[in-house]
Image (cartoon, rainbow, N blue to C red):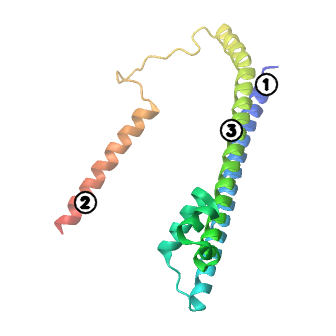
Amino acid sequence: MDLSREKTLSAMTSAADLATAAGDALRRTEDRKRDEDFGQVKQSLNDTESADMRKGRDLDADRVGEIRSLMAEGGDKAVAKKFGESALGSPEAVKARAQRAAIRKHESTMAREAIGTAATENDQKKVTVAQQASRTPLRDAAIARQREKDPNWGRQKPTTTGQPSRTPLRDQAVARHRQKELDRDREGLSRGR
């Protein structure tokens, strides 16, 4: 009976680990996709710019940036008001529109991903909490049974060497300290030569 409960607990733990790993893999895939999309947009903008350069037109980067800002704030009306109606058909305006469209597309993609990630994380938290809640009574019952069998179970045994008991964190700190000392000694030897 106890063995089946232990298997159930182990299966629930590994299921939670698998869910976490799957979520991480999904996020990495989404990040790669977003980077690829951004790379494609950037490449299309570079292609457009190089095509304009090949045609012999030298675009004014400052004017493109200003037109793009005006389009973001007030659209074509703001551009026409500042530069005139003829500026709406200029190569700078075309490039500014393309850049603005790429920016809007990127922003909407990021917003959708943020919403999806938040929903996924919320669902994952609910599953984790539910799993932990379902494990706790079983774990508590198993501990109670073990204590009934062995009253000293779970108590720290006194050390026979007189030294404080070792803990993983203490061991890690000692190992880091020793490594630093070795590194300093090696550095001193290499300077002495």
The answer to whether 19 appears left or right of 54 in the picture is right
> Residue 188, percent across and down?
21, 59
Which residue lies under the disc numbered 1? 3
Q: How crowded is mark 1: few (under 14 residues within 10 Å), some or many (20 or more)?
A: few
Question: From this viewpoint, is residue 35 visible?
Answer: no
Asked if disc 1 and disc 2 are in contact, CB closer than 8 Å, the reply is no
Amino acid at pointer 3: Glu
Q: Is residue 2 left or right of residue 147?
A: right
- Of the 4 image quadrants, the one containing the C terminus is bottom left
Three-letter code for the amino acid on which mark 1 is drawn: Leu
Mark 2: few/some/many CA within 10 Å (<14, 14-19, 20+): few
Residue drawn at (75%, 21%), measured in percent from left and top? Answer: 134
Label 3, secondary structure: give it.
helix
Q: Which residue is drawn at 41% across and 36% down?
A: 171
Which residue bears the numbered disc 3? 121
**Residue 108 pos. (x, y %):** 68, 54
Whether 76 is drawn above or below 128: the answer is below
Nearer to me, 100 or 19? 100
Q: Residue 187 carries which label?
A: 2
Picture layout, residue 174 above or below residue 129: below
Q: Position of residue 29 (x, y in %)?
A: 70, 57
Query: Of label 1 and label 3, which has the lower sequence position?
Result: 1
